[in-house]
Amino acid sequence: MLFKNKKSKIFCIGLNKTGTTTIEKVLKDFKYKLGNQEKGELLFKDWYKRDFSSIIKLSKTAEAFQDAPFSFPFTFIALDQYFCNAKFILTVRDSPEQWYNSLVTHHSKVWADGINPPSTQDLKNAEYRYKGFAYENNKMIFKTPEDDPYNKEILLDYYTNHNYQVIEYFRSCPEKLLVINVSNDTDYIRLCDFLNKEPIHKTFPWENKTRDKKKKND
């Protein structure tokens, strides 16, 4: 049996490119101590082995967390079992297709030619975190074919299944979960209520309305 930790934690468990950067800004506004993202991203091999002990250990170092490995399937279950007072935020897009297009566009810009989805070789050559990290990460998380690392059907299913599993898991305790779309300005107030915080803005914050409005779903 896992030891129950009663400290309050906030976990954003929406997939990357669903507005997690916007949530990070909100959490910073409210002075939450945020977890170290680089350390979190490097725990993906532990996640792959379903060894959540290192993820729980990292979760003890701050108050709020987002992106990898907290956005990976199954992580939220281990976190909920350990941190009994934790709250979870599931960020979603308007559709699975919208999420897929955003993910591929972003990865193409940082790891490929900015037009086409990254190839397996592109991922192997990418030097984010360390050379080969992007390839290993993609392989372990998405389980896509070697010759089609951004297989659309598989990735759409991944998005849909993750959101379904989160919502279904918290069905008996809906007070622990908030599902929001940062494209909906009214969801900012819902998020503040969920966090028991007085709103600082009227809508989700972004630094430059011309440039960053397109980035709200990052």
Image: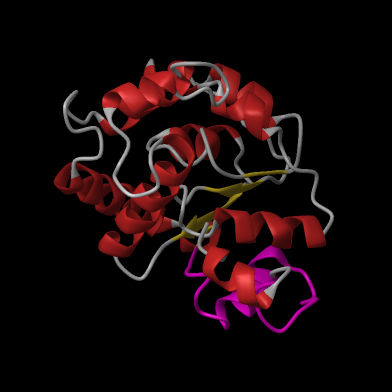
- Please give left or right for residue 28 compared with residue 108 in the image: right
- Please give left or right for residue 131 compared with residue 208 in the image: left
Q: Is residue 6 above or below residue 46?
A: below
User: Is residue 83 at least partly visible in the picture?
Assistant: yes
Q: Which residue is at 43% across, 26% downward?
A: 134
Residue 85: x %, y % from top left: 64, 47
Instruction: Kindly indicate the quadrant of the structure image that contains residue 42.
Output: top right
Q: Is residue 172 above or below residue 155?
A: below
Residue 93: x %, y % from top left: 39, 65
- Is residue 197 within the magenta segment? yes
Q: Which residue is at 39% across, 56% downward?
A: 102
Seen from the viewer's position, the closer of residues 177 and 33 is 33
Colour basis: secondary structure
Seen from the viewer's position, the closer of residues 40 and 98 is 98
Q: Which residue is at 69% across, 71% downward?
A: 192
Q: Which residue is at 51% across, 35% downward?
A: 81
Highlighted range, magenta: 179-205
- Please give left or right for residue 22 compared with residue 199 in the image: left
Residue 136: x %, y % from top left: 38, 19
User: Is residue 140 at least partly visible in the picture?
Assistant: no
Residue 180: x %, y % from top left: 49, 68
- Is residue 116 within the magenta segment? no
Count of marks overlaid on the render: 0
Seen from the viewer's position, the closer of residues 65 and 105 is 105
Q: Is residue 84 above or below residue 189?
A: above
- Please give left or right for residue 66 compared with residue 167 in the image: right
